[in-house]
Amino acid sequence: MAQYNVYFLPHEKKITVDEGETIIRAAMDAGVHINASCGGEGVCGKCRVLIEDGEVGEGISEMLSKEDIENGYRLACLSKVKSDLTVRIPTESSIDAKFLNLQATPRKTARIKQLNLEDLKEKGLFVPPVEKIFVEMPVPDSADNEADVTRLVGALKRDHGEHRMEFDLSVIRKVPDVAREADFKVTANIARPVREDGKNRIINIEAGDTTDHNYAIAVDIGTTTIYGQVIDLISGEVLAQYGDFNAQISYGEDIISRIVYAEKKGGLEKLHSLAISTVNKVISKIVKKSGIDIDEISTITFSGNTTMTQLFLNVNPRYIRRSPYVPAANIYPPFKAVEIGLELSDHVTALVYPQVSSYVGGDIVAGVMGSGMYNDEEVTLYMDIGTNAEVVIGNKDWMVCAACSAGPAFEGGGIKFGMRAAEGAIEDFSIDPATLEPMNVTIGNVRPIGICGSGLITTVAVMFEMGIIDNRGKFNRDLDTPRLREVDGVYEFVLAWKDVTGIDRDVVLSEIDIDNLIRAKGAIYSGCMTLLSEVGLSIHDLDRIIMAGGFGSYIDLEKTMTIGLLPEIDPEKVTFIGNGSLMGARMSALTNSIRRDVVATLKKMTNFELSETKSFMDNYVAALFLPHTEQNLFPKLKARLEERKRQMQQ
Amino acid sequence: MAQYNVYFLPHEKKITVDEGETIIRAAMDAGVHINASCGGEGVCGKCRVLIEDGEVGEGISEMLSKEDIENGYRLACLSKVKSDLTVRIPTESSIDAKFLNLQATPRKTARIKQLNLEDLKEKGLFVPPVEKIFVEMPVPDSADNEADVTRLVGALKRDHGEHRMEFDLSVIRKVPDVAREADFKVTANIARPVREDGKNRIINIEAGDTTDHNYAIAVDIGTTTIYGQVIDLISGEVLAQYGDFNAQISYGEDIISRIVYAEKKGGLEKLHSLAISTVNKVISKIVKKSGIDIDEISTITFSGNTTMTQLFLNVNPRYIRRSPYVPAANIYPPFKAVEIGLELSDHVTALVYPQVSSYVGGDIVAGVMGSGMYNDEEVTLYMDIGTNAEVVIGNKDWMVCAACSAGPAFEGGGIKFGMRAAEGAIEDFSIDPATLEPMNVTIGNVRPIGICGSGLITTVAVMFEMGIIDNRGKFNRDLDTPRLREVDGVYEFVLAWKDVTGIDRDVVLSEIDIDNLIRAKGAIYSGCMTLLSEVGLSIHDLDRIIMAGGFGSYIDLEKTMTIGLLPEIDPEKVTFIGNGSLMGARMSALTNSIRRDVVATLKKMTNFELSETKSFMDNYVAALFLPHTEQNLFPKLKARLEERKRQMQQ
């Protein structure tokens, strides 16, 4: 895709964006404010900009006069970049010159990390848990009428150096006919053991040479969503992916309410069968999308948090929510997928990621494996922020981990207009420090209906940096704007007036919302601090951060540090891996050695129950500020705030 | 039970019998002939004997005159031994003095061999495939909230030296609740590996200490009958046994017809489910009879011939009946009993005896193991004569084996009045050499309705030794008795006239019947000869014979040698083990080391396809005589025949 430079005046800020990007998003990314309260649907007409040079697509609206259009004015929210551009923000809708440099820093998002397939291949790790070997069995005659399976095992030993072989009953059932169908030339599907001294198990046999067709499925069983991928084990590529809501959702949004339901009569079986049915639906979709034959799938790998794993496998999760929070198992044995009701061939082996503890589950272990953290020297902070938040700190030699009771604020829970990252959610925000007019950017560029996690972080960060809210999360009561108001004793700020929203109400941000956000980020940050202090390290010892989860790669890293969710670190050292759980499941599907590594990794991961860890409460209370009671932990922010103060006093 | 001596005059033969035995059976066992054609129901009245001393019960009939009764005459078939007796056979119903010593030798049956439990215990072999260990798990607290299964495995390692542990998914499901139910004191059911370097697998967990309740089931899957036993793994005793007809019988009496049916659409599934349903019926009966809790069964061991094993496990038997007769597998993996539809607890592990070849199956391997032959120095001939006949020769160092196409003559097949060993079957026979009046003894002492395998052998042997039939199996055409007659060109001998039978016809033995018997015994004997010659040995090298199968312990060994079914050997060296297949299954249930031994034994067992072995046809043709073309192979019989000839010429 072509890329173009957009040069904003009078700010003199330049940014490179993809062709087709809207000017308003380009401005946001460059740290340039344009009044725009309607979310980018051309409704409010406030985002009038002058295209001084270059070509834009669209951008014309009835909100603009004929004369404006002739003079080169366009609405920034509707204009799409088609060439290099010079764009002037008109004085009346821009900030005073004095404030030009007070803008928030340009948007910085994390690099997105992918599985490095070439690296896996080079290291010889591209050996899946089930391998296919083409074998020519000796044809029986009256001088040699050994049993068919014995004949197969013998040929594997003689011609392929395969030893320590076992086989499934289902293979015995298939061998006689399959062998004769293909003149005793067959492909054996061999499940590899975790340890080299384990047994190799023939789990399937196919007529002829099918070694170039070997597929696996990786599934992430999330509390909210279940994602699946079909993986080509020859190329390593994902052939199809699909996600669907976990059908258990009707029985509780979060883990605790699921466990409560599972404790009712028939509840466990119900939740188990709902998870299975969702997985079956996902399997059916991705198999269809990828166009493969379902019988050519040899393994399915699952990862999920401890509760989801137990519910999925029909294991009572009752004790997960009761002190001392004991899960049923850490490691799960491989089993046949059909055994739990999955609609796959008889031979398909199911592998399940192991758990560290009741609240640091297989999804986190999978992320640690899939991201490569388990194998790296650098001291890494791994965070997975979804319905829950889990944190792992360490490197290839040691790891500490904990679950933080962050609550669902980042997914919209406990926030008055909070919502998931869906169409109409404010996902980006800026504000004119002089007029306090906002610039709302919504997902889908439609009228705002709420605010999602990344929008919430950015909004609070910008307002804090602009002095609109203080370090306790309270609005500056002296602000002269009708947007700030008190309703039923609670102060709130109107992000979008009713006439430009997609609902028949104003979309607001209240002090209760801010308080909930601070508690959530405080729980996570103090979790990190507690883990670090337990191993005698500080924030400064972190070499890098890996972010995983539904939280999104779109999140503005500096804003995240401004509110004190992430410690201050060079944004270049932050990578985003998206669904780390799914990435780990895919990694396991591709390379069997990870199953051995994961057992070793598990032994290195020391779990902390934060509620049982003395220093946690002190750390938590200290974190209930923006960004923290100790501003020295955030030196760059501190410098910016001081610079702002200095400029305001000029 | 009390035993008494019965002294027969004028023969001067004495025999010891159990109290309550009939005089006619005592006479038969002593080799004393009494005319008795009605099978022992007191119908013909011919078996009048004089009780000269001692006391008998019953024996009085309307066939006896009042005077006879007063003088001490009784019917031998109705009289029961109640004390030491002297019994005189009256001249009119006895033989001439001349023939007194021409009687067949006294009945000699084989010793019955049982499993030697004490020996197993002494050798430390009393360790079943699934062992129970009582474990006290550490109770979790906030300082130790490891997963339940990890806690269990840890305690097994620390307190019981258990290593290399695996566990089933079902165990994960049970551990949390079971452990808490019994204050973390539980019993682990651990499946032991075949090889010592294999994994130990926890397959079940029970609350509290249940180590004194451990049971197994052993099942013999016969073509005709399926037998099951409940075995107490603490004492080694059989708590209950039950046998039922294999429900597959409606789809064919023999193996070949079952395979033919299995090849039809849906046929295999039908036969599979019929076998499963019969086994479920047997399990239900024996569990009820033994009074145990079905959940306390830990393993089930199966043995059966190759076709029965494949049908039972839903493995296509098509290639078993086609040259080069390749079975699907030799060794079967352990699997969960529920996996094939058995009505047992989820955790029950099913073990299946391995097969040597398509026609020497797991039933024979089980017999070789159960009888101890696999472990003995003596060169042994092991024979299993049922619907098919299989022969194994060898000792602990080597074994050769073959299936003989004997046909079903010994089970009544191809014999005009042939029948299984059921009520009304002539099972024993003697004949008056002068009058040619028979002495028929039937099962249940009722009117004869047919003749069973052991009856057939004895009848033909006695007739041959008396010169009634010649060494080609043809009746002496010069005999002066209405019992010998020609019907539709076939000579036959009336064993019981219509008026004393239980059917409305005469019960006869024809030359076609004799011919079928000779072919059957010829196939078995020539199989032995062929195996021996292949290893460079002769009949004289055999140290002992072990007989197994439905053939019965009641069979008269000398008669069996007279017709040339068994080679001539000291009857003391013959043992009968009954259902060798079931005995082997029970042995496997009791001691896990047998599973390792059986793999080693299997490698020692060299299979011969007789039809592909050059010398077999010559051996077979030579064996189609009574006892054989080469009478020198039967020196004792030869001496008796010569003695008889000498006496007749006096």
Image (cartoon, coloured by chain):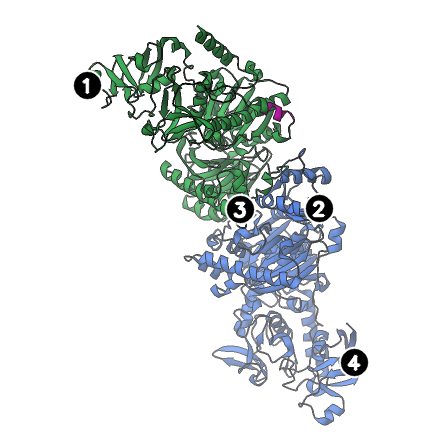
Chain colours: A green, B blue
The answer to which image quadrant residue A553 occupies is: top left
Label 4 CA crowd tier, 10 Å (few <14, some 14–19, many 20+): many
Q: Check the residue under mark 1 and report the chain it is in.
A: A
Q: Disc 2 and disc 1: Cα gap in Å?
A: 90 Å
Say which mark, if any, is on residue B134.
2
Residue B545 percent coordinates (x, y): 67, 59
Task: Return the chain for callout 4.
Answer: B
Q: Are marks 2 and 4 on the same chain?
A: yes
Give residue B315's mark.
none
Vertical placement of residue B592 versus A626, above or below: below
Q: Nearer the viewer, residue A624 or B384?
A: A624
Secondary element at tag 1: helix
Q: Secondary structure at mark 4?
A: strand
Looking at the rendered structure, the kind of residue marked 1 is Lys
User: Mark 1 highlights which residue?
Assistant: A66
The residue to which callout 4 is attached is B85
Identify the magenta region.
A614-620
Task: Please tell me which residue lies in front, A465 or B116.
Answer: A465
**Which residue position holds label 3?**
A268
- How far apart are the two marked residues, 2 and 4, measured between alpha carbons? 60 Å
Viewer-nearest of labels 2 and 4? 2
Measured in 3D between alpha carbons, the distance from the residue under mark 4 to the one under mark 1, in whole angstroms, is: 139 Å
Mark 4 vs mark 1, foreground winner is 1
Question: Looking at the image, which residue is at 62% across and 31% down?
Answer: A611
